[in-house]
Structures are given as C-alpha cells and as structure tokens.
Amino acid sequence: MTAPKAVVLGANYYIGLSVIRCLGSQGVHVTAVDYSPRRAYAFSSRWCREKLVSPHYKEEPRAFIDFLLDYGKQQKYKPVLIPTADAYAEVLDQNFDALREYYLLPNPRQDFYSGLMNKNRLHQLAKEHGMAVPESLPVEEIDRAEQEIGYPCLLKPTSSPDFVRIFRVKVFVAKNRAELEQAVAKAREHGLDTIIQRIIPGFDDHMHTYDAYVDQAGNITHWTTCRKKRQYPINFGASVYTEQRHVPQLHELGSEFFRRIGYRGFGEIEFKYDAQRQQFYMIEINVRISNLNALLAQAGLNFPYIMYRDLIGDPLPPKAITWNTGLHFWSASEDIFAIRDYLRRRQLSFGQIAKSLLAKKVPSIWDWRDPLPAFRYCWLLFLRLLNKIVPGRRIE
C-alpha cells in the first residue's frame, strides 16, 4: 500500500525546511507549498519530492484554500497537512471543516487553534483551568493599567501573525503613558487589537518551552522541555539560541493544561519563570511546528514524523527526553544581530557569548546531509545585500 503524502506549507523559512527533512529522511513523500518560489530555499532540499507554487495565503485566502482542495482531491489517500507558520495555521483552522474532507489534520474542530492563538481567549481559558498568566488589561483601561500593572509594560497583539508581519516585532514595550498611547495608536492604524500586559521580570534565560505531542486519543505520547538563551529581537523575540533542558515542573503544568482543554496534535507552551514570585507564567501557545524543531529532532523527538504516523493510524511508541542532552538550537544569521544588541545593552558579556558558542549546536539551516538549502539561503542573503548597496536597481 502506498503511504499518504505530507503537504508542508511554507518553504521560505527554516521551520519548513526542518519539517521537510524530518519527514523526507523517514521515507515520507513530501510536497512543499509556497507562494514565492524565488525565496523558498527549502525547495532545494533533497527530501522535497514535489514543489508547488500556491496563491498567497493572506492576499488570496480563498484561492489558496481552493488550491489545497484541488490538490487534495487528486490524491488517492488523504495527505497529512502541516503548517509551519502562525498565519498558515490560522487560515487552515478557519477552513478546517472543508479541508478535513481531503486532508488529515490534528486539530479536534474548526477554530480550536485560532482560539488558542488569540491572547484574550487564551488568557481566559488559562484562568478557567488554573494556569498562571501575566496580568493583562484591555487598552481601554489605561488608567487602571497604570495602577495595577505599571511601567514598563507590554502592548501585545491579541493575534500575532499580522502584528509581526507589519511591525517585525512581537510586542511594543512602553516606559510611560505617552509611549503606551503612541503604541496603541500605531496598532489601531492597522486595525489591530491589543492588550496591556505586565512584564515578567528576568533575563531571557527565564524563558522556557514545553514541547509535546497529544495523540488523537488525548494521550501525551512525546514531550521534552527547553530553555531559551538568546532571542531576536532581544528580550521579546523568537528563539535564536536555545538549549534542551529538562524541567519536570513544566511537564506537570503543560500536560495538565493540554488535557483539560482537549488539545490534539503538536503544541508548544512558552513559559517565563518569575524568580521573585517563584512561579512559571504561561506566555503563549504555538500550535504549529516549533522554531526549535531541528533541535527537538536531533534530541530524539521527530515531531513532524510523530504527528504523521499518528494521523495515518500507525503511531510511534511513546517517548520523553527527561535528561539534559547538552544540545543547543542555533539560528546563526539571526543570532549575530541578537549578540550585537545584547552587547550594546550590556545584558551579556563577550566572555558569556564566547563560552556559549562552544556548546553542541544544532544549526537552523545547515545540514551536511542536505547542503543545498543552506547554499541557496546564502545566495538570497547576498542578493538582499546587493539590493541595499546598489541604488535604483532590483537584483533578482
């Protein structure tokens, strides 16, 4: 019997590349989908069997879904559909009922993932189930926020994809009322809903993740935990240097929360530890494959393949990484800018940076077994640099 394909959405970022490698190296037929073939360096992977250019999921959402439906109708067996970015996960979740007729998807029902991606709904759900979250208030209650939250504080989007796409940051930091009002105005100019939130004290290494897979029967079959070391943008950004580190308490918190809300599929809960209150606070949930996927796979948890096998009805044996492997995820091209900013703000020293670079690292893009995507990525960086230094001419 021919096994179902895996359709991976997004080939212009290292998450999609890592998913293609995780599945293709296990013999799965991988179909990669992206709207920009020029920037989709993961198309160059040796394990990418099909390359499809789709309509833009944001600019032409209806055409994008029709594109996926047309492809699904042509397949003998339902493919496993895997989004690799929040925006992909959001549009799939909103069209779940139509897509599940032709694809295998882990989410239990339509709009389930979208609810978890929305910060207001997530905080409400967390409070209902006893999970600690940072104190938050709607932007209409600035006076109350000044009294109960104080400055500095965060202005966070209720839904991240559009905010990150427009501003290239995950949050705004406000040191006073004027900055907060200015940040609110900027978000409103683009029609974005936001909330005011307390900043949990502590350096970036207080950030942790709980990465787990919940099978279709509701059992947590695979899991581990990680600790961030560096982020970009620094302090409130995405992981660029992160270690796999076992923290048992995160499994206790994360597994219970997933069980109570009826979660299914891969999920990553981000926590921050407040040393003053000696408590972990849930920051957000990633319902798509993690930025750290290459690290998790190297540590022994190939989450894309775990999900694939579960959804086709042939699950892998349960496994948890309950020790410290010493492995570190490293996104070198982003970490360069993170290091620059940490040094400028004197949050890290040259000695601390140098010591960290001696650790065992799992690169985000480079893989000696599959080198072409890295070469293609470097070429794209070179072209981007040329476009900046050569005025009045676009170099493709």
Image: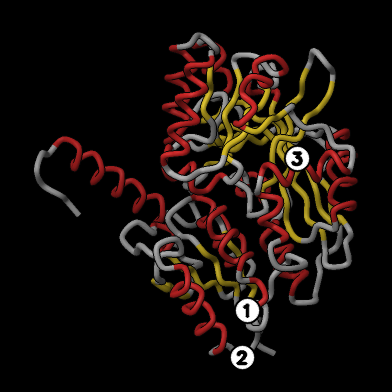
* Residue at x 47% of width, y 73% of height: 62
| Residue type at numbered disc 2 | Lys
Name, please, the residue furthest toward the left: 392
Distance between the alpha carbons at the discs numbered 1 and 2: 18 Å
In this picture, is 308 found above or below 267? Answer: below
* Residue 159 - label: none
User: Of 89 and 139, which appears nearest the observer?
Assistant: 139
Q: Please tell me whether residue 385 is drawn above or below residue 307 in the rendered image.
A: above
Which residue is labeled 1 in the image? 98
Residue 196 found in image quarter:
top right
Q: Nearer the viewer, residue 172 or 35?
A: 172
**Residue 389 placed where, x, y %?**
16, 35
Residue 303, given in percent of the width and then of the height, sits at: 70, 57
Q: How is the image coloured?
A: secondary structure
Lateral position of residue 144 relative to residue 236, left or right: right
Of the 4 image quadrants, the one containing the N terminus is bottom right
In the rendering, at what x and y percent does residue 280 appear? Answer: 80, 28
Residue type, mark 1 in image: Ala
Indicate the quadrant where residue 142 lies. top right
| Quarter that holds the C terminus | bottom left
- Residue shown at the point (76%, 24%) measured from the top left: 273
